[in-house]
Each structure stands twice: as C-alpha cells, then as structure tokens.
C-alpha cells in the first residue's frame, strides 16, 4: 500500500519540457520577424496575434469559468472607442491610451457583470449580447464620436506616434506581440494559481466547491473582469491599426465574437493549446476559402457543429488524447514516488 | 392622446414579438434548450413562405397551411437527428451547436436569396389598410390581425398544454425527465414533438413578419434578442407572461421610437435590463430555473 508521502503532485510532462524550447524559438522568431517579412505579412501576423489573444480570453471565460459570453464585442468596441477618444479629445499618445482604456473597461465591466450574472448558462450568453447591443446603439447616438458613421484617427495623431510609417508599423507590431505574449502568460499563471484550482473545482461541481469555501461569485467576477480588460486592450490595438472606427465595426458580433468562438471550439475548448490550434486552422481556412464569401462561413459553421457533436474537446483534444500530450503544464497529475525517482 | 396612440402602436408591435418569444419559451420550458438560431429559423420561415407564395401563387395567409407543417416537420427531424444529441448537463453543446446553425442558416440564405431586402406584398391592400378611431388614433388592420393571431396561438398552446395528453407529456418531461421516462414517455420523441410545435409557431411568426416588415438574411439575430427579452420580461415558463413580455417590449420600443428613431431598439434593451435588475425572474414567473 502506498502512503500519501509516496505520491508527488506534478504538472510538467516530458512533452511540456520539450515544448518550452519550442516556445522560446517561436518567441525569438516573432521578435525578429520584422527583419524578414514585408509589410503585408506583418499586418497578417498582427491580425493572428489579436485573434489568438481574443480566443485565449474567450476560452478563459467559456472554457474555464463556464461563462459563455456572446457579447465580448462590447469590450473590443469600447477599447477602440476609448483609445480614439483619449487620443483625440485628451491628446494622449494612442499607445498610452490603450492601457488607460483597459483600466476604464475593467471599471465598466464590474456593474455590467452585476447585471448579466443575474442570468445563468445560455441565458447569460444572450444577456451579454444584449449588453453589447446597448453599447453599439448608444455609441451610434454620440455625435461627437461621429454617431452612426463613426470617425477616423486624425492624420496628425497617427503621424505623431513615431518617426515615419515604418517605425509606426514596428511599434504596432511589437505592441501586438507584447499583448499576445502577456495575455498568454497571464492565462498560464492564472490557471496555475489557486484561482486555476478554484476554476477547475467550480467547473466540476458548483455546490461541492461552494461547500469547500470557494467564493464562486468572486472567482467568476475576477475572470470576467480580466477577460474584459484584455479584450478591451486588444480592441484598442485593432482600431489603432485600422485607424477608423464605427459602431457597426467596433461592436461587430461576426468579427469579434463569432470568429473567436469558432476558433476556440474547433481548436479545443478548455485548454491553452486549443485556441492556438484553432487560430491556425481558422486562418488556413480563411486563406483557402477567402474568395467564396458566404461558403466560408457555412464551412466554418458546419466544422464547429460537427466538432461540438463528435469531438467536443476539439482538434487539440483529439491530438492530446491520442498522444497524451500537454504543451502547457497546467493540469496537476499524481505520480507515485518510485515513478518519480526513475 | 399621443400617449394612447403610442400605447396602441406598441401593443400592436408587441403581437409579433410575442410570436417570436413563444417558440423560444416552449423550447426552453420543455427541453431546457436555448436556441441561438431561433431568430434565423424565423427568417428561414419567412423565406420559405416567400417561395411558397411565389411558386403556388396563393394568398400569403393560405401559405401558412404549407409553411407551418413544413417547418414543424423539419423541427421534429432537427431535434431527433441533431439537437437531442446535445442535451445533457453541459450547457455548452446545445449553445454552440445552435450558434453554428445560426451562422449556417444566415449564410445559406445569403447564398440562395442574396442580401437584398425582401417583403411579401398583399394584393388586397390589407398591409396599408387601417381603422380610423379618432383624429389621432388609427389601428393598422394587418398589425391587428397579427396581434389577434398571436393571442390565438397562446390560447391554443395553453389548451394543448393543460387539456391534452400530449400537453401532459410535455409538462411531465419538463418537470422531471427521469420520472417521465419511468412512466413510459419517450423523451426523444416528446422533445421532437415539442420542437415541431415550437417550429410551427416559428413558421407563423416568420410568415407574418414577411407581410409586416422588410427582411434579409442578416436580421435573424435581432429577432432572437426581441423574443428572448420578451420571455425574460414575462418570466420563464408562463405563456401568458410571454404575451405580457412581448407587449411590454413593443410599447417600450414604440416610446423609444417616438423620442428618436435611433432610440427604438435601445429603449427596448434598456427596459429589459432594468426589469432584469429589479425582477431577475421576470414579472410572472412560473418555473424555477
């Protein structure tokens, strides 16, 4: 009989140790990328970076906290509008306006949470959607922000960001990479912290975790606010790159939430690796089917439905089960002492 | 006088919203399914109606006799083949599968019918006819017919629910699936039938919508939101509550539109959120969930 002391709790696996080397290589590649590729490719990488960040945040909400939101476009739009208003009306440098927008969104998301948390499960989903619509329709009424037709970031502000176009694009590129890596690190540390454990416990059984002293409301609230802040920051970045904002573009359900949900579901919900795989598949399909318009969305839709029905853990779920792989060591595993000593 | 006019317009608008909400309310009430594609099914029904009217050359109201069984039958098959697989303790599969369906329906409609705005015209001028009550108040004949039909749908459903064997099976399954099965009820079949009934209501809603307003493949999601708001305002599990919710939402939107056209939808959403904060379980709740 093994005693309690004979077991070790571990999170790292052989694969995850090898993966560290891979992550370092990818990060180095991302940082040196601007030396090698042209402007179009850089824009493409920026887009991948912000979609992956949005996907990680939605996955944190839906996959870990059980908060299936269909209204994250609310925070993307708010981030964009707050960044532009900060730059235009308060003369703040856009890159400084982005984190300020993030903080303000964190503040706004708290009363929002108190409203939408009154709805549970699927009703929560539609409630978040209504809130996003309220933001979209309200911003369309604000004439100083261009009303329904929106506004552009004035050329003087854009030019004042950095010396020349190339420097500006580099600045946006590195901001995007910084936000991506920062958010991935945030998710990773969050899941390894006691909140990660609490989230797993809540996911497995709300009453049981409640009885063990986990504050369910507080835990979900923290995740909701964190996701809102990061999503808002990404929104600021998106519209800094686009240089133009309108209520329909800023609070677009198809662009900022539908695409992200497809990415996470197809890739594998409830894992850090899933959104990465999903983003790769999403952009590959998009490049392949870009000329077909509606057909592309139909294919994605069918892909998502089939995944949900026959492989609910997504593509990564299938891979990780088949090869017993884990690239981000966040799961705690129990191994016996003798096994560990080998 | 102006306020009475607004109230009447709102109530008439609310008739259509009640129909949007009823199907949603049925699906949630019986199988705890929140159908994200609900609005898109309404628009799908509108297009099916459009084709039926065009091909058969019949009166739009007669088209209901074709569209209702068609959508109802489709609903049964959809539930048995696809949606029954998603039901369980996890809320994610039904949510995401219907979400996927929503995107698929929108884009299939876009491929087949293009994004052009459509509308069913009534030959007999019914769509513009109105009853003049006083100098300020007139009631559109078509909106009045829609309101009466929506109340009729609620009355029929109430009868089915509380006076027939099928309704008893619906209520039993809704109360406790496992016990219902022990009593010899086939859940899968009952869910199929419930979806068929819900889709029949969706068909009525879609065909009536096509007579009253313009529509295109992208307008489904907002119909889902109106229906959802009406259900929550009224309270889950109560059909009369759903009617009240639909009417309240209609009046809220009419008042909003009166302030500023841009405020119509916004006012509906705000009234919904305010009621959600004050009465989280709606105004006339029946079931606890």
Image (tube, grey):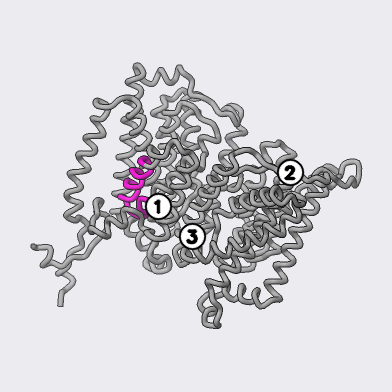
SS assignment for the magenta stretch, majority? helix
Q: Chain of mark 1?
A: A
In front of the other: A323 or B88: A323
Q: Is residue A39 above or below residue B52?
A: above
The CA distance from mark 2 to mark 1 is 41 Å
Kindly indicate the quadrant of the structure image that contains residue A36. Answer: top left
Q: Which residue matches tag 1?
A: A265
Give the magenta part as a residue range: A265-284
Quadrant, the N terminus of chain A: bottom left
Kindly indicate whether the residues beneath marks 2 and 1 are on one polypeptide chain.
no
Instruction: Please tell me whether residue A310 is drawn above or below residue A174 in the rendered image.
Output: below
Residue shown at 30%/40% (left/top)? A181
- Write down the residue under mark 2: B255
Residue extending farthest to the left is A342
Q: Residues within 10 Å of mark 3 (few under 14, many from 20)?
A: many
Q: Secondary structure at mark 3?
A: helix
Q: Which residue is mark 3?
A: B94
What is the secondary structure assignment of the residue under circle 2? helix
The x and y percentages for residue A307 are 40, 56
């Amino acid at each position: 009989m093994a005693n309690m002391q004979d077991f070790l709790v571990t999170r790292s696996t052989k694969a995850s140790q090898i993966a560290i080397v891979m992550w370092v290589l990818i990060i180095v590649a991302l940082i040196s990328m601007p030396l090698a590729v042209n402007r179009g490719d850089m824009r493409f990488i920026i887009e991948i970076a912000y979609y992956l960040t949005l996907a990680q945040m939605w996955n944190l909400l839906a996959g870990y906290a059980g908060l299936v939101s269909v209204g994250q476009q609310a925070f993307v739009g708010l981030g964009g509008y707050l960044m532009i208003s900060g730059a235009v009306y308060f003369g703040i440098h856009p890159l400084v306006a982005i984190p300020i927008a993030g903080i303000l969104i964190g503040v706004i998301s708290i009363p929002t949470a108190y409203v939408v948390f009154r709805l549970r499960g699927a009703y929560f989903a539609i409630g978040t959607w209504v809130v996003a619509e309220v933001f979209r329709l309200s911003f369309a009424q604000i004439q100083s922000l261009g009303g329904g037709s929106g506004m552009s970031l004035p050329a003087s502000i854009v030019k004042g960001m950095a010396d020349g176009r190339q420097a500006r694009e580099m600045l946006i590129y590195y901001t995007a990479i910084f936000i991506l890596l920062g958010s991935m690190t945030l998710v990773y540390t969050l899941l390894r912290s006691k909140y990660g454990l609490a989230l797993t416990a809540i996911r497995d059984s709300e009453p049981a975790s409640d009885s063990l002293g986990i504050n369910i409301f507080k835990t979900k609230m923290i995740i909701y606010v964190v996701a809102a802040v990061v999503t808002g920051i990404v929104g600021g970045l998106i519209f800094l790159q686009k240089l133009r904002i309108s209520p329909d573009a800023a609070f677009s359900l198809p662009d900022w939430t539908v695409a992200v949900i497809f990415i996470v579901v197809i890739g594998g919900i409830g894992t850090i690796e899933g959104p990465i795989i999903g983003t790769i598949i999403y952009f590959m399909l998009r490049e392949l089917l870009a000329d077909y318009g509606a057909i592309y969305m139909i294919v994605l839709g069918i892909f998502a439905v089939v995944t949900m029905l026959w492989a609910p853990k997504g593509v990564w779920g299938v891979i990780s089960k088949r090869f017993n792989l884990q690239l981000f060591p966040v799961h705690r595993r129990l191994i016996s002492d003798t096994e560990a000593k080998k | 006088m102006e306020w009475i006019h607004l109230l009447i317009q709102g109530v008439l608008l609310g008739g259509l919203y009640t129909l949007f909400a009823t199907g949603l309310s049925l699906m949630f009430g019986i199988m705890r399914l929140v159908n994200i594609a609900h609005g898109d099914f309404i628009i799908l029904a509108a297009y099916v109606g459009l084709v039926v009217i065009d091909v058969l050359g019949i009166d739009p109201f007669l088209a209901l006799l074709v569209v209702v069984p068609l959508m109802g039958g489709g609903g049964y098959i959809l539930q048995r083949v696809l949606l029954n697989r998603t039901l369980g303790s996890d809320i994610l599969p039904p949510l995401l599968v219907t979400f996927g369906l929503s995107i698929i329906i929108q884009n299939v409609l876009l491929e087949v019918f293009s994004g052009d705005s459509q509308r069913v015209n009534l030959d007999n001028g019914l769509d513009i006819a109105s009853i003049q009550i006083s100098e300020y108040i007139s009631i559109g004949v078509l909106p009045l017919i829609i309101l009466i039909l929506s109340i009729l749908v609620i009355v029929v459903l109430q009868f089915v629910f509380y006076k027939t064997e099928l309704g008893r099976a619906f209520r039993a399954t809704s109360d406790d699936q496992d016990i219902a099965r022990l009593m010899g009820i086939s859940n899968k079949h009952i869910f199929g039938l419930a979806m068929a009934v819900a889709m029949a209501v969706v068909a009525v809603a879609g065909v009536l919508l096509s007579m009253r307003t313009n529509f295109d493949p992208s307008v489904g999601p907002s119909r889902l939101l109106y229906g959802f708001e009406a259900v929550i305002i009224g309270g889950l599990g109560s059909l009369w509550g759903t009617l009240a919710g639909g009417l309240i939402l209609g009046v809220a939107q009419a008042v909003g539109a009166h302030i500023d056209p841009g405020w119509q939808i916004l006012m509906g959403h705000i009234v919904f959120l305010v009621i959600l904060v004050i009465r989280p379980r709606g105004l006339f709740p029946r079931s606890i969930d």
